[in-house]
Image (cartoon, helix red, strand yellow):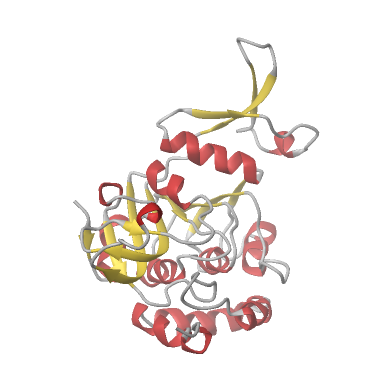
Amino acid sequence: MVKFLPLKEAVAENLHDGETVAFEGFTHLIPTAAAHEAIRQGFRDLTLIRMTPDLIYDQMIGMGMARKVVFSYVGNPGVGLLRRARDAIENGFPRAVEVEEHSHAGMANAYEAGAAGLPCAVFRGYRGAGLASVNPNIKSVTCPFTGEVLAAVPAIRPDVTFIHAQKADRKGNVLVEGIIGIQKEAVLAAKRAVVTVEEVVDNFDLHPNLTVLPSWTIAAISIVPGGSHPSYTHGYYERDNAAYLEWDEIAADRDRFQVWIQKNVIESSAEDFAGRVEHLRKAA
């Protein structure tokens, strides 16, 4: 049964050292507050899965939390590199990180296979691409009906998935509006799921078709207004473009990175996120 918990408790109950974890969100609804709580609790040896690793994985990798990263794009959206991730991959600082790279199609299909309880995903992809030469988890299979050669990748089945969403109702159902990305499949593929939301409401009567995740798919819900900053939450606040530009300078320097993490993560809390988005909120 889904629990409504403070984020600190939700993370502590559902994430453990050495586990495989997905923090998913696409363009908006990135679960930054949940990632920051994981940093505060100091988890180690994680396998981090995310279609588009951006600032939150740069921060987690920079804090030495990741043993491996499974991804289909690594970068600071609209800006450039993820400098802490690059430092870890190229220089082993603060620790060496194993990488497993896929295409977006490969990752999406792998999540869908995990959600369906299948061992692998089979799809058309990777033709003419070089990823298969550097990723041994990309295989090919021959269709027994047509003889067509197709790509195959292992299903993604995280121990725990974290997402951010607009609303939960009091029964624990979760509503997502705007770009959904792969969050639904990432939750269904996981053993456990934690959702941070902007607010809790009595019901979704005005949005009956957007109850993407029923309560039985979720282990815990935490109310964290602003919890996706600096990404945006559709209908609530805009993307903080300045923060993405600033991050490129912060992450470029190891010492400056540590100072930022200490001030904005270690000495901060989930409650601080609401203030970070006040100047970005949409007019009612």
Q: Going by the image, does 61 lie left or right of 197?
A: right
Q: Measured along the vertical axis of the image, is residue 9 above or below residue 18?
A: below
Q: Measured along the vertical axis of the image, is residue 266 above or below residue 159?
A: below
Q: Which residue is drawn at 42% across and 81% down?
A: 273
Tell me, yes or no, if residue 7 can be seen here. Answer: no
Q: Measured along the vertical axis of the image, is residue 32 above or below residue 213?
A: below
Q: Residue at x 30, y 47 (%)?
A: 217
Residue 189, picture quadrant: top left
* Residue at the right extreme of this rendering: 128
Q: Going by the image, does 270 lie left or right of 122?
A: left
Q: Nearer the viewer, residue 70 or 279?
A: 279
Q: Going by the image, does 111 lie left or right of 96?
A: left
| Residue 104 percent location from the top left of the image | 64, 46
**Image quadrant in which the C terminus is located:** bottom left
| Residue 174 percent location from the top left of the image | 33, 58
| Residue 101 percent location from the top left of the image | 64, 45
Tell me, yes or no, if residue 145 can be seen here. Answer: yes
| Residue 79 percent location from the top left of the image | 72, 72
